[in-house]
Image (cartoon, rainbow, N blue to C red):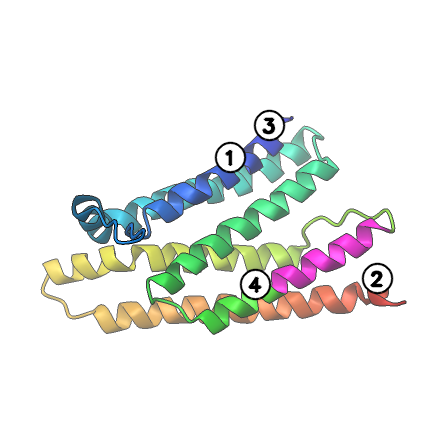
Amino acid sequence: MNLPNKLSLLRIILIPFTILFMLPISIYGFEPAGWNGFINEHGLLIAAIIFIIASLTDMFDGKIARKYNLITDLGKFLDSLADKMLVIGVLLAFIELGRVSAWFVLIICLREFMVTGIRMLASQHGVVMAAKMIGKVKATMQMIAIIYLMFEPTLMKIAGAFDLNLNTPITIIGDVFFYACVIMTIISGLDYLIKNKQYLKG
């Protein structure tokens, strides 16, 4: 396995660690108070750092693959899979935290399932589809929105330390980032569908 593929695999491995620091533990009544208190106080900040590291692997694996001619079908598959797993996993955690609407996350999930289906149909015609530019823009906007949402509690604490009542503006900015990434997800999904509709015929 070459280096870009290892970076994609690392991104997948970091997903459970990201979510571990996002959600307090509650398993059939088992709720470790000390750990959950730590998570409620500092968890999202640590999750943000892990998520940023995972996002950087997404940037570097593509650059390395192109620079050293290490582009493979496995790499295209792993890169796309890692991105989807990372974003959807974190957004599901935000639903659990009550920060984002399940309806909008459902839209994002449906788009990813649709694109995956089209890629499967294309593969039957011997075509392995790499990420398109509009898809990369969508992914970038999703990363930005998620990172901001993770930093929201820290921003609120900083504002509170200076006696600034900015919780509502900080939340509104997060909503704007999230809605923008949802809109971009819809646009990129429609673009994918229109440009690859030939694979849906027959």
Magenta range is: 111-124
Q: State the CA–CA distance, disc 4 to disc 3.
A: 28 Å
- The amino acid marked with disc number 2 is Tyr
Q: Earlier in the sequence, mark 4 or mark 3?
A: 3
Q: State the CA–CA distance, disc 1 to disc 3.
A: 10 Å
Q: Position of residue 25 (x, y in %)?
A: 29, 50
Label tally:
4
Quarter of the image with the C terminus is bottom right
For this orientation, the residue located farthest to the right is: 202
Q: Which mark is residue 68?
A: none
Q: Which residue is mark 1?
A: 10
Q: State the CA–CA distance, disc 2 to disc 4.
A: 21 Å
Query: What is the secondary structure assignment of the residue under circle 2?
Result: helix
Q: Position of residue 135 (x, y in %)?
A: 63, 57
Q: Nearer the viewer, residue 21 or 197?
A: 21
The label nearer to you, 4 versus 3, is 4
Q: Which mark is residue 199?
A: 2
Residue 117 falls within the magenta-colored stretch: yes
Query: What is the secondary structure assignment of the residue under circle 1?
Result: helix
Q: Earlier in the sequence, mark 3 or mark 2?
A: 3
Please tell me how crowded label 1 is: few (under 14), some (14-19), or many (20+) other residues with Cα within 10 Å. Answer: some
Q: State the CA–CA distance, disc 4 to disc 1.
A: 22 Å
Please tell me how crowded label 4 is: few (under 14), some (14-19), or many (20+) other residues with Cα within 10 Å. Answer: some
